[in-house]
Image (spheres, rainbow, N blue to C red):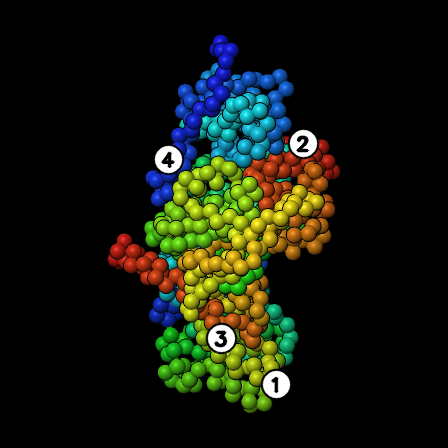
Amino acid sequence: MKIKTESKPEKRSKMAKQSPSKRRSNFEEVALGYNRYEAVAEANRCLNCKKPPCIEGCPVGVDIPRFIRQIAEEDFDSAVLTLKSTNSLPAICGRVCPQETQCEAVCVLGKGGKGDPIAIGGLERFVADYEMEEGVTIPDLPSPTGRRVAVVGAGPAGLTAAAELAKIGHSVTVFESLHAAGGVLVYGIPEFRLPKSIVAAEVDFIRRLGVDMRMNSVIGKIGTVDELLRDYDAVFLGTGAGLPSFLGIDGENLNGVYSANEFLTRVNLMKAYLFPEFDTPVKKGRRTIVVGGGNVAMDSARCALRLGAGEVTIVYRRGEDELPARAEEVLNAKEEGIIFRLLTNPIRILGDGNNWVTGMECVNMELCEPDESGRCRPVPVPDTEHIIPADVVVIAIGTSPNPLVSMTTPDLEIAGYGTIVADETGATSKPGVFAGGDIVTGSATVISAMGAGKVAAKAIDEYVRGLSGYENLLNIT
Amino acid sequence: MPFTILKKQELVPTLHRMDIAAPRVAEKAMPGQFVILRIDECGERIPLTIADFDAADGTVTLIFQEIGKTTCQLASLGAGDSIADLAGPLGCASTIEKFGTVVCVGGGVGIAPIFPIARGLMEAGNKVISIIGARSADILFWEERMKEASSELYVTTDDGTKGHHGFVTDIVQNVIESGEQVDRVIAIGPPVMMRAVAGVTKPFGIKTVVSLNPIMVDGTGMCGACRVLVGGVTKFACVDGPEFDAHEVDFTLLMSRLAMYLPEEREALDYKAAEDPAV
Ligand SMILES: Cc1cc2nc3c(=O)[nH]c(=O)nc-3n(C[C@H](O)[C@H](O)[C@H](O)COP(=O)(O)OP(=O)(O)OC[C@H]3O[C@@H](n4cnc5c(N)ncnc54)[C@H](O)[C@@H]3O)c2cc1C
Ligand SMILES: Cc1cc2nc3c(=O)[nH]c(=O)nc-3n(C[C@H](O)[C@H](O)[C@H](O)COP(=O)(O)OP(=O)(O)OC[C@H]3O[C@@H](n4cnc5c(N)ncnc54)[C@H](O)[C@@H]3O)c2cc1C
Ligand code: SF4
Ligand code: FES
């Protein structure tokens, strides 16, 4: 038993990072994680509040004070169990969740600007990495229920739903259109933020729960949702929001202009940064412009830099405070030397006679008074048009749901922008069909997609148990 | 779960037929659709048209030309080998209806994808006039198959070693001018050929369809690599196509986008040659 000291350090344990000068030319992980001593020291700062606000700040309600206390007591195995009882992908969440706007934002220690909130994400990552080093244990599985569930899409939503359903004893098949499971975790988020070996380990864990993973299976093409319903008792749709948006300005089809999805897929999923050892090429610009201010833009810019671009510029039409990306990633990008042209909006992309991009014409913007929604609309400043030279341009202004599934499922209710309508349990307008993650909310976060997968798994469990014949099945097995 | 190659045959020099076991794909495949395959962990995803399919046997037939790193590597595989990934059927199926008289044009490796379309149109009760062309007689393939799938078949070679000495467009022009009431033309082949066919049919106002082959990555509408301009509107060929109205397609854009990675493609071939001089 540790004796708690009266005064707690106000500063959090710093997590080691690769230096900016080194990391800007490699794809290895930037943040290196806490060692045991750092983790225990950080955990010891926790006040163990009676009414911990952090749990409420967490979209899936992880018992944060409990796992932190277990770290402080150096009982890491128990900390693993605590975390995993609510979050099946902690190694991923510890790395990519926006803790600064969730659990850490409401931590008592950070209130009033006196000290730093507990590094909850860093500690979560520490516990998950500890488990991976020690060897993951597969929980005992209950006897099969005889119920079959199809999960469409192997992103965080689909993987979580699959894992939860398998743990209850249902037979689960995942259909994924790409050749690898993970969704955005494998094709979008780069290696230096989330090593693919970690995603692979988490996917392997779910496979070992007995989930049948079928890659290269595009639902809507290889079979429709109605066809799945013939073979399965229920279907979960976790197909994400993967359709790239373009700006709709001149020059977007020039050679060297990419959607962020294409650029990131080439670099991350297809490993173009290892070309020609890996076969897929990507244009390595000398000067790259990335349009947008979210995580996707930061990831694209930092990939471009690592591919060898001498100059990478982010063009974003609002200001610093409006950047939707995680603060930590903006800081990382700045440290690495990415240029931020804020309050700047593209007007057109310029090309040469051979259809190759040469630059982008932009205009300066200013933020007007906030409207009723509280958001300041950017408006162009007259006579501030200017040209930024570039040989690669990446458009990272957002994505919308892919219509492949909705197009082939006529009785599925679809909302504006193509999202699938689902209630708070994930149930859609079509009996036996549930949905969750970005396909329902539009682009959101890993943890919210996981949360939706989990909630839907519970509703699916109730639904399939309610189907007639269940009692009989139980008696037989 | 890898996909096993059941049969491999070199039809003419550097052009191969491969039958691959893929029962689920074979069951759903329709003329005009394609697959995306990846040979191994280091491989690129490349699209190939489903040239034939047999739902009963669970096989799909691909015909491909050795042109770069991936297709050369694929050509080095044989029956019993397998490839890591094959996704499909992708893209929209060709519109197969009773149109009346349809002219099917296949140029070079484009003969392969035109075959199931011609066959489908015949089965739907059309008069099918097929025109297949190649640079030279020794690289012309599937003449017999095409004959069976057509009411009439014309052959052209650029060098005159077989059939009409000239281009497929000459025959398209002749057929139309012969007074034949042509209700629809479908052309698949190199972009220059498709553009030329579009040029011939446009003055006659004959509905003409081409199958576009831009560079693709996922093949499901997720990346936009395959964007083409049709009637001034950007389309994703992998989900909106691959077939489009020939008179609306911006072929110049298509061709310049196809050339986007020429230096990298050369580098990949050189790298492969250095790695494995045997292949
Ligand atoms: C570059 C980038 C960086 C991001 N960074 C962060 C971050 O730091 N923190 C954070 O919390 N969030 C981040 N996000 C957002 C987060 O990744 C997503 O909100 C989350 O992945 C959504 O999960 P999902 O399971 O709903 O969908 P996805 O992850 O999109 O997965 C959907 C899966 O379904 C598959 N699929 C689609 N259609 C079909 C079909 N018809 N048949 C079969 N399979 C299909 C897709 O191939 C894909 O694998 C980022 C997103 C991007 C693009
Ligand atoms: C819908 C569709 C159907 C196709 N069907 C056939 C077919 O049935 N038979 C056949 O021989 N070829 C077909 N192709 C073309 C085939 O995909 C390319 O020849 C192949 O990708 C070349 O790869 P490589 O590595 O051997 O050559 P590379 O040296 O990489 O490229 C050679 C040329 O092929 C094109 N190309 C390269 N990569 C791709 C890619 N990922 N996607 C599309 N084109 C690319 C480029 O124009 C390039 O200049 C089809 C293409 C499309 C889009
Ligand atoms: S709010 Fe902060 S200090 Fe309080 S229990 Fe949660 S992590 Fe610990
Ligand atoms: S190939 Fe990616 S959208 Fe068509």
Q: In terms of secondary structure, where does tag 3 sit?
A: helix
Tag in front: 1 or 4: 4
Whether the residues at callouts 3 and 2 have beta carbons within 8 Å, the answer is no
Task: Read off the residue under disc 3.
Answer: B194
In the image, what residue occupies the spot 49% across and 72% down?
B251
Relative depth, front residue between A3 and A173: A3
Q: Categorize mark 4 by other alpha carbons within 10 Å: few (<14), some (14-19), many (20+).
A: some
Q: Quadrant of the C terminus of chain A?
A: top right
Task: Read off the residue under disc 2.
Answer: A474
Residue B92: give its label: none
Amino acid type, mark 1: Gln
Task: Read off the residue under disc 4.
Answer: A18
Evaluate whether label 3 is on the same chain as label 4: no
Q: Quadrant of ligand 2?
A: bottom left
Compute the Cα span from label 3 to label 1. Answer: 21 Å
Task: Read off the residue under disc 1.
Answer: B181
Residue extending furthest toward the front: A383
Q: In terms of secondary structure, where does tag 4 sit?
A: loop
Q: Categorize mark 3 by other alpha carbons within 10 Å: few (<14), some (14-19), many (20+).
A: many
Q: In terms of secondary structure, where does tag 1 sit?
A: loop
Amino acid type, mark 4: Gln
Amino acid type, mark 3: Met
In the image, what residue occupies the spot 57% across and 45% down?
A153
Question: Can you tell me whether the CB of the residue at mark 4 lies under 8 Å from the nearest atom of ligand 1?
Answer: no
In the image, what residue occupies the spot 45% across and 69% down?
B255
Compute the Cα span from label 2 to label 4. Answer: 55 Å
Question: Can you tell me whether the CB of the residue at mark 1 lies under 8 Å from the nearest atom of ligand 2?
Answer: no
Q: In terms of secondary structure, where does tag 2 sit?
A: helix
Relative depth, front residue between A338 and A73: A338
Evaluate whether label 2 is on the same chain as label 4: yes
